[in-house]
Amino acid sequence: MDVMPQQDPESRRPPGPSPQGPQDPQDTQGPYVMPAEGATAVPPPPPTLRTTLRRAAFGAVAAGVLLAGALVAVEDGEGDGPKEPGPVERAEAATTAGSPASLSDLTALIGDRQKWVESHPKDAPSLATLGTAYVEWARRSADTAYYARAEEALKRSLEARAGERGNGEAWVGLAALANARHDFLAAKRWGETVKKQQPKTWSVYPVLIDAYTGLGDQKAATAATEKFGELRKGVPALARTAELYRGQGWREDALATAREAADRATQPAEKAEALHRLGELAWERGEPEEAVAQFDAALRTDAGHHASLAGRARALVALERTDEALAAYQSALEKFPRPEYALELGELYESLGLDGDARTQYAALREMVAAARKAGVDESLLLARFEADHGDPDAAVELLRGQWAKQHRSAAVADALGWALHRAGESEEGLEYAQRAADTGVRNASYAYHLGVIQRELEDYGPARRNLEQAVRTNPAFSPLAAPLAQEALEALGAPPAGGPGDMQPPPPPAPEPKPEPKRETARETERETRPEAPAPSKAAPSASPSPASSKAAASSPAAGKPEAAEASKSP
């Protein structure tokens, strides 16, 4: 069923007769009144000169009064201010600024463009706008059926006017559609085609940022973010910069930039998106109370921001407000049925021992993934995460190897592949991918937990303890199932051995070799030199004491120090 506009702009309304009837005899749309018959049917005599002058003077005064009244009326009208824009105009303004439109305004824009292209089937810009609006509607409503409509509208736009002839917006729409379907290579190709031909088209850079991020190309994503900030300053550029800092683990910079975006946002949908980002950052820092406050503010600003319902539910679990969390998850799935919310709710049920309810959510997840696949959306990453923990780890490995072969090498894919390999009994290979995810710098408690568990399995206890501590310190309640396991694994490792940090220091430099002690005879010789020379003893007389040379020889003899040798030396 087509989405129809809530309010038709007055510019589209055809002109019609006034409901009070014609005000001008030339208005043929009203009934024509015949002149009265009788005395008035005879032409009157010509007026005298005095009468003509009086009538002219009276007419001049009347005209002045009417003109003054008209000027006063215009001034009073100008004082009322400009006319409030309708939903279509608001959606167009948001799109032009690069900001999100509210769902109600987006609905109106879609209905308006649908109606217009019915009578103008070759209007390439309108078809491109319609196709891009379909992509945004599907992304924010989780209705994947609209992706097929988007593709059809964008192809019709390119048939009416090729991209090389200036229809770059249709190419940008196809890039956005590819990103929404998680086909990041196709999105990169479409986006770079526009960038090559129209490098100053700012609207291409957000889709390029998403494509590079999905491919794990941080360098290209950083360059595209910087270029977007040069071409399109304001809240959209701040939002993209905050996400870049977040992905690199620069928490303070991400928070400061996200706060600036929230302070400068003016439209409700834009403001709600900025507040939601602050809630996500607070959740990742392990501050659930702050996260709930930000998500509540986002929902008060724009009740249609359904992603904040799921974020609020996640934070309520950390605060052990379980009943409220369950209600928030159920509301989010009803209004915004994304499979990842079904996985989170299923894990919450499982942590509470409600295995039947958990299985129901897991079955719903599989159905959502299957429906998305029919619409061309690749949910392999999410399905693999589910299989690794709740299904078949080997199937998870196969799915993720396929993603890696498609060059989908983001931190999320690397972490999931490393964990799936560990769960499938291939911890050594899994360590490579889990370490790669951590090396991106992103501060994610789940990534640190996975890496620590794999390292513990490989008996690399020091790094395992460090990463498990990081997971618990970063967000103590990052998952209702995994967070308690992380704490148990850390406690099982125990405290590090005594002197652990010292053992990690480099060995001390070798001590210098001791200098040889001066010979004993040196001192004696010095003493001899200071005394007067004694007369030489007679050769026949025996020496009173052994000479230094003989003493030295005796000391070096193998028999030196032995009593038997001493006695033998005394015998003649």
Image (tube, rainbow, N blue to C red):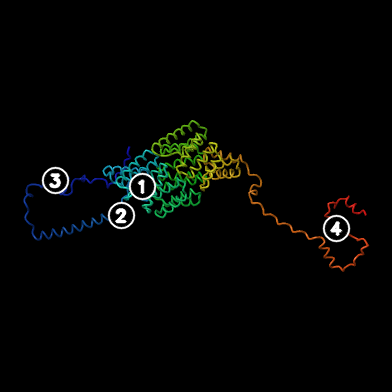
Q: Nearer the viewer, mark 1 or mark 2?
A: 1
In front of the other: label 1 or label 3?
1
Residue tagged 4: 551
- What's the residue type where badge 4 is placed? Ser
Q: Position of residue 12 (x, y in %)?
A: 27, 46
Q: Are marks 4 and 3 in contact (CB under 8 Å)?
A: no
Residue 212 placed where, x, y %? Answer: 44, 47
Viewer-closest of 160 and 104: 160
Q: Nearer the viewer, mark 2 or mark 4?
A: 4
Q: Nearer the viewer, mark 3 or mark 2?
A: 3
Q: Can I make out residue 387 in this image?
A: yes
3D distance between C-alphas at marks 4 and 3: 155 Å
Q: On the image, numbered disc 3 is attached to which residue?
A: 32
Q: Neighbour class for label 3 at 10 Å: few (<14), some, many (≥20)?
A: few
Ranked by sequence position, the earlier of labels 1 and 3 is 3
Measure the C-alpha gap from mark 1 to mark 3: 56 Å
List x then y, in percent, for residue 517.
77, 59
Sooner in the amino-acid sequence: mark 1 or mark 2: 2
What is the C-alpha distance between the residues marked 1 and 4? 104 Å
Mark 4, other Cα within 10 Å: few <14 / some 14–19 / many ≥20: few
Q: What is the residue that sits farthest to the bottom in this orientation?
A: 532
Residue, disc 2: 79
Give the left or right position of residue 16, taking residue 295 as reference. left
**Tag 2, which secondary structure?**
helix
> What amino acid is found at the position of numbered circle 2 in the picture?
Gly
Disc number for residue 171 = 1
- Nearer-N-terminus badge (2/4): 2
